[in-house]
Amino acid sequence: MSRAMIPSQQKLAEKLTILNDRGLGMLTRIYNIKKMLGNPENKPTFLSDKSLENAIKNVLRKFPQYDMKSNQLNSINSMKAEIVKGLSLYYYTFVDILDFKDHVVDLLTTIDACQVYMDITLNFDITKNYLDLVTTYVSIMILVSKVEDRKAVLSLFNVAHEFLHGKGDPSYPRLGQLVIDYDPPMKKMAEEFVPHSRFLKPAILSLHKIYPKRNLPASQMRSLQILSLLSEPLKMSSVPTTDTIQCDYLSLDTMERWLIFGLMLCYQHLSEAQVWDMWKIALQSGYIIQLCRDEVLHIHSYVVSFFDSLKGHNINHKRVTEVKELQQHALSNSPATHREMRKFLRSTLRELTLIFTEQPGLLGPKALYVVQALSMTRDEVNWLLRHVLNPPSKRHNIKISQEDFYDRQLPELLFYTEELKGLIKKYNQVIQRYYVQYLCGYDAVYLNQLIQNLSMCPEDESVILSSFYSGISSLTVKQVEENEIFDFRGLRLDWFRLQAYTSLSKAALVLKDHQDLAIHMNTINFHTKMVDYLDELLIETGDLSIYCFYTNLFEHQFKQCMEFPAQHRYSIIFPMICAHFMNATHDLCPEERHSIGTTSVQYAHWFLREMSEEINQVITAICEEQCMLSYKLLPKHSAATILNTVQRKKNKDKKKTIQEPEKPGQESIRKNRENFTRMDKLHMALTELCYAINYCNVIQVWEHGFVPREFFLQQLEARFNKALVGMMMYNPETNEIAKPSELLNGVRAYMNVLQSIENYVHVDMARVFNNVLPQQTQPTDSTGEKTITANYTNWYLEVLLRRVTCNVGQIVFSPSQKAFVSITHTEGQLFSAEEFADLTELRALAELIGPYGVKYMGERLVLNIASQVDELKKLVINNKELLSQLRTSFDKPDVMRELSKKLQKPLKSTSTSHKNAPSDVDIVLMRMTIIGVLLAFRSLIQEALHDVLDDHVPFLMSSIRDIHHYVPNTKDAMVVNELASSAGLACDIDPTLCNALRTLKSEHAEDEYNLACLLMVFVAVSIPKLARMDSSVFKASLEGHQNNSHCLAKAINALAGAMFTIYGPGDVEERLKEFLALASSSLLRLGQEHDKDTIKNRESVYLLLDQIVQESPFLTMDLLESCFPYALLRNAYHSVYKASAAD
């Protein structure tokens, strides 16, 4: 004998909660299966395998029946294990759906048996959950019917299962019948719901009290001042009066799905006035309805096909015609209606944001307005997304304006929703404090009165109501102040249970007879959510995870936002929305968490990168403008103004007018503020974009934290790095390059603009400079690209100094002007040497590349010197015997003369000898001059560095000078010399040159000292040869020889100091004395020569001895006097200066 059903023991609340959650999981799983089977790339390979093609046709022919003995199924047998493994996820999802369907049918039958009264305004939770369950069930069955290859998947799996286990899966017969019965699904479900319609219809009808009020056009909402805080200033701090508080923020989309799917199941009642009104409004609101995520239905067509299938079941042709008319109305009017709604919401949310930001205390009483606004906005965004990507069929002949869909100001609306949510989270304690006081100070008191007024209350219900009262009456503000964690989930679930108990037909306490209690308990339910359920409520009403499934549209809206300057400040909303994506996941479908999470991270990264790129483009444009303005202020541009003044004076009496050149600063003069210049537009764009990037510190997406300002800084550093090199305008093909002073001027202008960025974004621009500028002092930056240091080093060594050394007599090093000076200008010469190699330009270069860059440039220079020394050593080795004899014969003039002649013989060549062929002496002089020129340039750049450092770090420089001056000449002196050299100080012995010479690989390592001595002898006896050269003439104006032979002084002293320090016992002074004796002896012989060619520039060469002594820290004038009469030097100076004056 069956036991009687006890309604109070059916646990309707628990079952509805669990089944709704499970239904969402099933909906997510069948959605994913549909997507995978609909995509050839993701579809299981078995379904497109040629070898299984006949087998699949065989099992589908009489689905769900098939003949296991058929030979065509043998191909399945050969791969049965793989098929079972590959299709099990799909198959068992269908099994789970069948199981879910059984539970739904069972629960609906139980609800019918219990005769539960449904009214959304009274028993909100049970009615909402009931309607949600029906809608989810319908959506699942429709999606199942839309899955491609569902029959093939089920039958293939079952055949493989039977081959593998000897029997088919027990669920297969019912699954096969389910697929057949529910294709199409609505007709079968409508038949199923005939007994349930007695309770479904009242639940839907209860929406009549709220749905028409919620689905108002924007114009009516404006006139009714809906969501306006300013419409009634006196009531601004009062709680909104409403009897349907939980219905007020209920999703309109959700209600429309309830109505459309519910009334399709109860189509017999469409003739009733209230039902028809809601059916009409719902079908006029849009023409696309959401099933799951981006899976949608063209609802009017679907309803028409459903009604067509019911012909003869109380559905006449009139109903189909009405639906088609409603479709025409929706196609014609709904896009514009929703466009206006978005405009209304945009202005309303802006007002709410401004007021709540200014007065966050209002968030307490007006929290309902926030969740209402979020819910309405979310519905509008959902409506827009599904309608944009699902245009109506062309057969309707209705032109839909694209402006209604491609809303350029949508980012602003989305931004305000996120800002409102941010305010709620920021001031959550304000809201908690308010509602804790409200619950214990008013709600508990009024609830107690209502409980006392109950005429008859059973014990169970009385216990639950008493627990409600005790739960909220004991709350205190102190709990909020102490950050106590509240949890009212039990209270809300008990209220859900109480609704189920009191909504039964034979309940002892009937809820519909105590409407005040129901309304007040619904209000308490909402108030408790304001205390402990705030984050979840924000997700419920403001979740935009739908964008995860409309990524193309998401990208398009972002690009549209970046193209529209007025929306730039709201662009940050796009990466913020990526944080919502994980809300779309469900526990019953864990496998999609990773793909959705990855998508969210990738899009957040892409949006922030694009935003940073856009800001940097604006900054670059501003920097270019500022660099151009700064360039106009360079001294060289004053020439035009001076010339114009001179010409005006000359043409004073003439009537001819001379056009005056535009002066710098002219661009700042404007007649009125309405003239919007390019710079104004750029600064406006910069302000808006920086507002976006500065809006939030961190965006949490999945398990990642994105810092927008860091994205911006990384992009800025990379762009600044490239800009610095770009401003050099270096062209390796034509060897053109910017002057260092002009580049420095541009860099300072660029840095001034970047410094001003701190006014827009909370960033440390000094960090950018410290990260980027030091990279430019190295040969390559962090990305491996060439830097300012590398390019300038290359240009000075390979272009300027090569031209100095190769084109003898064109460019001269001038010690007096501290510059390399071009004395002849040839055709095709791109630059004058003094424009790049004077002390002013080199100071600018030192500013740009710093001590590290100068050190690198010095090392490159010295490597060239080392290679020249290597070649000189080879010459010394070739003439070793002669040089050894010369070294010991400096006091024997005749022997010296004979040996010198032998040394000056031209090199032997395979070709016919030529009288102008260079001798070893010529080559030694040439290479020593090259070394001297390189050292002269090095001394200039070192002096420039010293001046720059003296200006920047005077105290540090004074300390370095002191250490350098007072440290004794010991082994540690070389370390101090390296420190001093790095700071630009001149050292007696160049440490960089020593290091370079030390690294030279020599075949005569044991004889290096002797070779060094003989090299000095070679140079000493070669100097007289200079007197023969026309280019050896001394230019008094430059204080140098035309062929740069005066640079020999630097070469001789530097090489002697370096070589005798590293190769010998450090006897630099003795070796230089020996050199001076040999050189003076050789030069004194010139006085006995009578050949005019030999003594052509004798006086100019005499001066070289004086210059060697002046340059040397080891030689003195007394020593020179002992070797070479000073009278000869005095006469030589007189002669060359007189000749220069005559020229």
Image (spheres, rainbow, N blue to C red):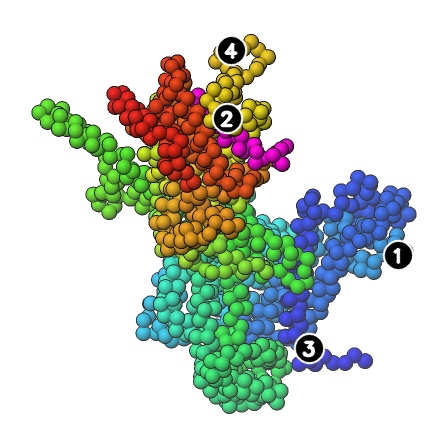
Query: Visible in this render: residue 1051?
Result: no
* Residue ranking furthest to the left: 653
Query: Which of disc 4 and disc 3 is earlier in sequence?
Result: 3
Magenta-span inclusion, residue 1024: yes
Q: Position of residue 710 (x, y in %)?
A: 49, 54
Label 1: which residue? 165
Q: Position of residue 500 (x, y in %)?
A: 61, 77
Q: Give the camera-side residue of 710 and 1021.
A: 1021
Q: Which secondary structure, mark 4?
A: loop
Q: Position of residue 123 (x, y in %)?
A: 56, 75
Which numbered disc, 3 or 4, marks the residue closer to the eye?
4
Tell me the CA gap for discs 4 and 1. 104 Å
Tell me the CA gap for discs 3 and 1. 39 Å
Q: Which secondary structure, mark 2?
A: loop
Circle 1: residue type: His
Marker disc for residue 10: 3
